[in-house]
Image: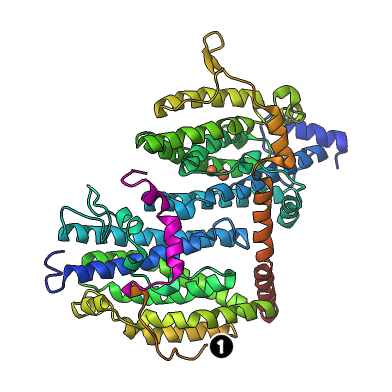
Amino acid sequence: MADQISNISTTQLFNYTLNLADNSLIMGHRLSEWTGHGPILEQDIAMSNIALDLVGQSRNFYQYAAQIKNKITPSGDGGKGTPSVDRGTTEDSLAYLRDADEFKNIILVELPNGDWGYTIAKLFFFSTWQFLLYQKLIPSSDAQLSAIAEKSLKEVTYHVRWSSEWMIRLGDGTDESHQRIQKAIDEIWNYTAELFLPSAFENACYENNIGVAVSEIKNDWTQKINDVLKEATLTSPAAVSSPLLAGKEGRHTSFLQEILDDMQYLQRTYPGCKW
Amino acid sequence: MQDETGLLETFDDKVAKEIKIEPRDWMPENYRKNLIRQISQHAHSEIVGMLPEGNWITRAPSLRRKATLIAKVQDEAGHGLYLYSAAETMGITREEMVDQLLTGKAKYSSIFNYPTLTWADIGAIGWLVDGAAIMNQVPLCRTSYGPYARAMIRVCKEESFHQRQGFEILLTLCRGSNEQKDMAQDALNRWWWPSLMMFGPNDDNSPHTAQSMKWKIKRFTNDELRQKFVDICTEQAKILGLTIPDPELKWNDEKKHYDFGEINWDEFWKVVNGDGPCNSERLAARVKAHEDGKWVREAASAYAEKRNRNN
Ligand SMILES: [Fe+2]
Ligand SMILES: [Fe+2]
């Protein structure tokens, strides 16, 4: 690892890896809220499966991020403002002991689930983006990121297919489902702009052949989205006029705080315990 | 064509020879009814059982625990699916069964009408509830009805995995801080008796047992299974260092079994009849999921129909 990242600050690589981890975790967490509440038993299972894939991906990224962090600060502390843990940084200290403003996920993934259509639209936009991102991450000069991307790509291929099929089914289903899914798309659309705006850590990683230039996947993403929306007899909203970076830089909605209040509650209430 | 007596003889003969009854075979009407009731109740239990544990997915205290819990609850959905399919081979549809559940006509295991108050409950459920389920279900792998027996073989493999995971959650807590150990003990205090109730009424109060044993739907009586469960769990609790909340629990060297106290049958019947701590909450959650999902199911069938027409 050390020689591969000699030209880049380790903090940038750490942040880049955290961004990938946080996206998967928060999206997976949201999807897991459906477990036991889905509209059809088979689809409840499918949704849980995707949640599981995403939590799994996040663990791979967090474990790598922890390795990086422990090299930066060998004595280890879980991150800004967190009590130091003797075993240094771990996947769990990263997930459970950071504050909301230290999370680097895009806003899209922290949005509440809404109805089934809203969740499907979120997942469809996200998975399509993740697919293109991971594809471009495979040739990364960072062997670990490359390996995780390659392993995850198989899963994400399925997520794209599954969510696309649901987009089409809902768009071309009944009048009600058409209206609901169109409304979801229109509401979520603004949040997709952040997917293609590079943050400082993304730029740094891209320049060092480690990361992906997110702006470069925008065309393919738009193409794929439009193809599916067309087949679903749905309308693509107009381009977002002035997109803003937010989540990647730690500026989140209160929805993330709500997620973390729930997710981190045990670790925060009983610090230093093994579970 | 055989007459009814001949058919019944063939059926009894197969059951006696341990040949599985298959969906196309003739079977007595009561055998069919009894099995539909049992299998669909079992399926409903898997589905309702997703709720108390699903509650803790978003609060699981580590990423590994979170992933394992999602997978576990998802397994239970899978069990529900196999079981609904097995029941469908007897001439009832999944819609009819779901309707019976949502209208309160069908029962499900009362254990899921108790709340999950702490993380230790997830351990206790795995250890005790999945443990009791295994005790009930392993003999069902040899039950006389083929599709049910085959579904149970798949289910049992996963249940024993769940049971080990639950025990491991408790073991971790018991080796942790005092607060964690207290949490584990408290969970055991609350889940012990309801778990014993999972084996059903005492044998003298179990109207279906005799017939079910004769038909080889059941292989052991409720009390036999309950005794086996108590014997095993008492030993396991020692490994955990937890105390089973039963002052009458003690080894009987003559019987080579543990003696244990009497179940509170008033509570048992109260929960069975709908007055448990979470009966209405559980049912309401299932009704809500069903109603919220109505437009989705309608869209899916409308779309499928369009596709069929165009092909
Ligand atoms: Fe199960
Ligand atoms: Fe289970």
Which residue is rendered at x = 54% and y = 19% of the image? Answer: B247
For residue B204, above or below residue B107: above
* Residue B297: percent from left, percent from top: 67, 68
Amino acid type assigned to the residue bearing label 1 in the image: Thr
Q: Relative to the observer, which residue lies in front, A242 or B28?
A: A242
Q: Give the structural element (helix, strand or loop) at label 1.
A: loop
Is A107 one of the magenta-colored residues? no
Q: Position of residue A205 (x, y in %)?
A: 22, 75
Q: Please determine whether, in this image, residue B306 is positioned above or below residue B106.
A: below
Task: For residue A200, say whether it is visible.
Answer: yes
Residue wearing tag 1: A235
Depth order, front residue of B109/B304: B109
Give the residue drawn at x 58%, y 19%. B260
Quadrant of the rendered structure where residue B2 is? top right
> Which stretch appears magenta?
A249-275
Display colour scheme: rainbow
In this view of the protein, can residue B216 be seen by the observer? no
Quick check: A250 left or right of A157?
left
Residue nearest the viewer, comparing A168 with B62: B62
- Is residue B105 rendered to the left or right of residue B177? right
Q: For residue A167, what is the image quadrant?
A: bottom right
Q: Looking at the rendering, which quadrant does residue B164 occupy? A: top left
